[in-house]
Image (tube, rainbow, N blue to C red):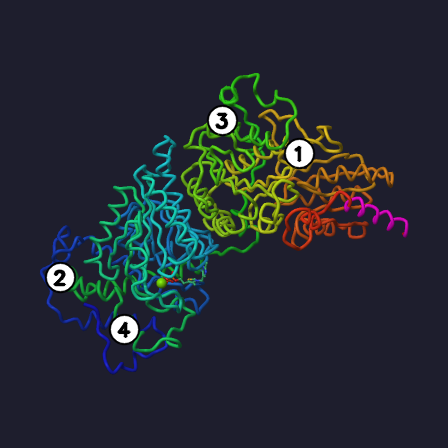
Amino acid sequence: MFATVPTPIPARMKGLNRAEICDVNFQEFVRGWDGRADAAPADDEAILDGSALDARSFRELFESQLISRHLDLMARVLRVQNKVFYTIGSSGHEGNAMVARLTRHTDPAFLHYRSGGFMAERFRKLPGMDPVMDSALSFAASKDDPASGGRHKVWGSKPLWVLPQTSTIASHLPKAFGTAVAIEQARRSGHALPVPGDSIVVCSFGDASSNHATAQTAFNAAAWTAYQKLPAPVLFVCEDNGIGISVRTPDGWVARNFRHRPDLDYFYADGLDLASGYGDVQRAVEHCRRTRRPTFLHLRTTRIMGHAGTDFEIEWRSIEELCAVEAGDPLLRSAAIALESGAMSKEEILALYEATRAKCFAAAEDADRRPRLSSLEEVMAPLAPYTPDTVAAEATRADYAQRRVDVFGGDARLPERAGPKHLAIQINAALHDLFAKYPEALLFGEDVAQKGGVYTVTKGLQKAFGPRRVFNTLLDETIILGLAQGYANMGFLPLPEIQYLAYFHNACDQIRGEAASLQFFSNGQYRNPMVMRIASLGYQRGFGGHFHNDNSITALRDIPGLVVGCPSRGDDAATMLRTLVALAKVDGRVCAFLEPIALYMAKDLHEPGDGGWLTTYPAPHEAMPLGEERVYHPEATDLVVFTFGNGVPMSLRAARAIEAAHGWKVRVVDLRWLAPLNEAAIALHAGECERILVVDEGRRSAGVGEGIITAIAEAGYRGRPFRRVVGADTFTPLAGAAFLVIPSDEQIVAAADALAEESQAR
Ligand SMILES: Cc1ncc(C[n+]2csc(CCOP(=O)(O)OP(=O)(O)O)c2C)c(N)n1
Ligand SMILES: [Mg+2]
């Protein structure tokens, strides 16, 4: 079957450059082959007796394998010449081409980085596409790279429904699962899908990756779904090469771990042998498509040429072991099949091998001559698209008047007629409105359906719009955000809810590494628009402790491209939500909407019963432009307070006391948008006022306050007297002690006192 390892191992095979050795091995294997050849099979005949693979398919698969191999060999040669910038290869995994052949180009694919064979084969599905040149452009980080526009070496293609992945292992499994669920949900709800309704989702990863928490939660969620007899047609392909970088996967572990999982249907295929593996891959694919059940295809592979070009395996693996692995090279097996079956002669194989090599090198040289990204503007162009006029038009579009009348139960019951209300009520009304406006909108999370969320903010939505649009998920934030990406991929408008800010952090990578990066790494070709609602921040009196009062916004602020809004009052929440949804719809943006829990029910501002924090619901044609601040007392110039969230009512109360104490008129600026920060507005107000106070309920280190102060300093107002009132760098304790670590009204007044003392001292 495979080549045998000669003993003693000849000097040539002990060389440092394993790529070169594998290259020579292949040629020597073909030249030295002395087996018996059958009469050449007809195109539609089995390649070998009993094989499910016909001769024509074999020849094409073999060619796809060779393309993948020569891209690897090329990358290793040209990396040292700085013509190619990536050397994690697909060698040993080329059998994944079978998965591509047996699926459709419209089956969305989320791929392992060793997918050269899969891609070369999927390219065949559409005429006029060139796997070699397209891949070479990506290896070369060329601006013409059709996958990422030169931003990364990714396996990706818009026409071939391959959504580019980052290299964080396992992070793509939740969204692959989400996409599968979305396909089925669309089928049942009549939502127009961008792919055929019987599509399945292909998701590949390595054996070591299968242990990752993010992978495990996807398997669990898929099984949890199937257990309830709900469809989740995702084909998980575990490409088991027995190793992760240098750590061996225990022998038999993948089979042991997955073979008997309830509601995750296990199939095994030999990815090293096209003739015998093909039928098994076919069974797995057909099973997934027909039953719509999550399917686990355990594909045997091997790893040839180390983890990446930088991995000199020879330094840490014995030569005997390396040679044994190389003797199991699936390309040797494919060559043997070609020869044994009589499908190809030695000369034909070697000619194809060399022609493919030449093609890969020529493409790489061509790619190297193409332009690369050469300015920051070019690099960032697809990261955070923003078309303000279209967004404003979309946010204020109010052509659903009758639907909203129906939803709210009559003209007289429209929320704008209901008089002043608190934040939770206005968010609830805004969500009802958005659901009336966008039939593709979905809301899901923990406890959001019948209960309406911990704070009843989503109460009534499920009743009004049904369980297909408003539903509870299983308890896992990673999956909630994976689902959101999947729904977005299939054209829905997801509004996932994260129950508390503290619980965003354990799923943060789904936004940081995945959702927010998709437009960037696909050069704007793919987008997963969403508005993630998160109950956030401190000052809760009813429900204490850190995890319900987390005030860390930092983890959101530094995610490139993410829009973060934080309203402090009900009317702003409604107009902000409309803009966030419009940003998602129009520009594909990923947005976070931080709802200050402590203000959900706040009604009063200065005195009990004054109703100072109630607002009237804004009519549906009103929206808040991205970045726009709300200014209280714009005429005031003695002191400006920059703040957001809970800091706004606190600062307004403090402003009264400050005026009483010092006679200052105080301007309070509610920034409302925390990312991107409106630095121009900050500079403007800072420039117009004599003193500056920053009230930031987040943490001292890396909080929003640092951004505000930087904007002020960079605008040239370094010399203005300023103070900062900010949360401590600590976790939030339970009960009354919580109020020791976050700003208070008194601290704001005290900071103004300090500013007054400073003025006198001058
Ligand atoms: C979350 C995460 N942790 C660590 C890494 C670094 N890393 C890259 S590949 C890899 C090993 C993956 O092994 P396996 O899943 O078996 O895939 P293989 O490379 O063997 O095909 C590791 C640890 C990563 N990319 N992402
Ligand atoms: Mg592995």
Give the labeled residue for mark 3. Answer: 436
Give the residue at the far front of this rendering: 735
Q: Regarding mark 2 in the picture, which secondary structure is present there?
A: loop
Amino acid type shown at disc 1: Ala
N-term mark: 2 or 1: 2
Q: Is residue 80 left or right of residue 19?
A: right
Disc 2 marks a residue whose amino acid type is Gly
**Res 324 label:** 4
Mark 1 or mark 4: whose residue is earlier in sequence: 4
Against 476, residue 423 (above or below) is: above
Q: Main secondary structure of the magenta part?
A: helix
Pinpoint residue 269: horizontal percent, then vertical percent. Answer: 24, 57
Q: Which of label 2 and label 3 is nearer to you?
A: 3
Residue 694 spot, x, y in % from top left: 74, 46
What's the mark number on residue 602? Answer: 1
- Residue that label 2 marks: 342
Q: Is residue 145 visible?
A: no
